């Protein structure tokens, strides 16, 4: 077997790259302009696997994909879905000590929470566990189910299965591991049913118009806008703002920052914003 030929990259031409960048930007807001090497490196193998020999042929496949499966594989190749429990733990402390006490006083028996760009569900389950800690025996008086959305069906399926390697949950308080997980024979951990039923997973592209029955009390959109340019992020943040209830919160990743000039959210502390409550 000629290993060199097998491993050889399929080169993307300038024209193909321009078209691919434009397609992905228009549809998903993801800016690949500086990722030419990543695109060639991560997609050459897939193109060969499909029996194709150029990016042009591969893009025809993508654009005409009715099943959504080809797009799904493509998105999995170009995005990073890395996530873990207790990531940026300040947010869960804020939830426990500030947001939930405030919302419990100002809402009645229902909280609407959205984990937007949820990857394999770690963030959403972490929120559900934090709510369980906060509400304790009062929990059954409240509807606090969490909407968890992503563009990748792969990660959503992982989220539904709720099985994680030990390394993924190592930063959680040790007691939570026994309280909220069961250990599987292969050494991985599965979130227990009580917490799993609190999270609803849905495929959703954040570039699409938001459709919701009632505005959200808390939106987590952490480490997602890293993919987007400023203009796309600003438009998305405005959509989040419109979808946030008065007094509700937007939590973003600590490496991200909102454009002060472009947003109506009030800055509370690093990576935490609030829609002001009108009296
Ligand atoms: C790095 S993960 C962040 C996961 C989690 N929020 C966290 O902070 O650990 C980013 C996720 O955003 C998703 N994503 C990227 N573009 C998106 C879009 N246009 N709509 C919805 N999700 C998107 C990716 O599929 C990926 O799962």
Image (cartoon, rainbow, N blue to C red):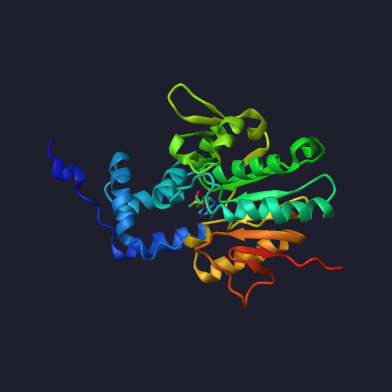
Q: Tell me: 35 left or right of 190.
A: left
166 to 275, vertically: above or below: above
The answer to which quarter of the image holds residue 252 is: bottom right
- Rendered location of residue 127, percent (x, y): 64, 45
The answer to which quarter of the image holds residue 5 is: top left
Q: How many marks?
A: 0
- Rendered location of residue 131, percent (x, y): 69, 43
> Quick one: quadrant of the N terminus?
top left
Of all residues, the one furthest to the top in this rendering is: 185
In the depicted view, which residue is nearer to us: 102 or 194? 102
> Quick one: quadrant of the C terminus?
bottom right
- Rendered location of residue 64, percent (x, y): 46, 48
40 to 122, vertically: above or below: below
The answer to which quarter of the image holds residue 173 is: top right
Of all residues, the one furthest to the right in this rendering is: 279
- Is residue 259 visible to the viewer in this orientation of the structure? yes
In the depicted view, which residue is nearer to us: 198 or 149? 198
């Amino acid at each position: 077997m000629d290993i060199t030929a097998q491993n050889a990259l399929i080169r993307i031409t300038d024209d193909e790259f321009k078209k691919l960048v434009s397609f992905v930007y228009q549809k998903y807001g993801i800016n690949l302009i500086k990722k030419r090497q990543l695109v060639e490196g991560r997609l050459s193998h897939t193109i060969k696997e499909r029996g194709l020999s150029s990016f042009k042929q591969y893009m025809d496949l993508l654009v005409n994909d009715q099943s959504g499966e080809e797009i799904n594989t493509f998105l999995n190749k170009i995005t990073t879905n890395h996530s873990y429990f207790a990531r940026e733990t300040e947010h869960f402390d804020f939830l426990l000590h500030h947001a939930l006490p405030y919302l419990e006083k100002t809402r009645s028996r229902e909280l609407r929470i959205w984990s937007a760009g949820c990857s394999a569900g770690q963030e959403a389950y972490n929120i559900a566990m934090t709510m369980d800690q906060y509400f304790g025996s009062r929990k059954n008086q409240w509807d606090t189910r969490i909407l968890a959305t992503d563009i990748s069906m792969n990660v959503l399926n992982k989220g539904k299965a709720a099985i994680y390697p030990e390394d993924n949950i190592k930063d959680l308080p040790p007691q939570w591991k026994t309280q909220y997980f069961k250990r599987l024979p292969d050494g991985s951990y599965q979130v227990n049913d009580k917490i799993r039923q609190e999270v609803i997973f849905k495929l959703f592209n954040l570039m699409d118009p938001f459709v919701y029955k009632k505005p959200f009390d808390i939106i987590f959109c952490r480490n997602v806008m890293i993919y987007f340019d400023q203009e796309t992020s600003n438009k998305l943040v405005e959509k989040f703002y419109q979808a946030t209830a008065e007094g509700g919160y937007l939590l973003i990743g600590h490496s991200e920052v909102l454009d002060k000039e472009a947003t109506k959210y009030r800055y509370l502390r690093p990576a935490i914003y609030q829609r002001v409550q009108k009296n």
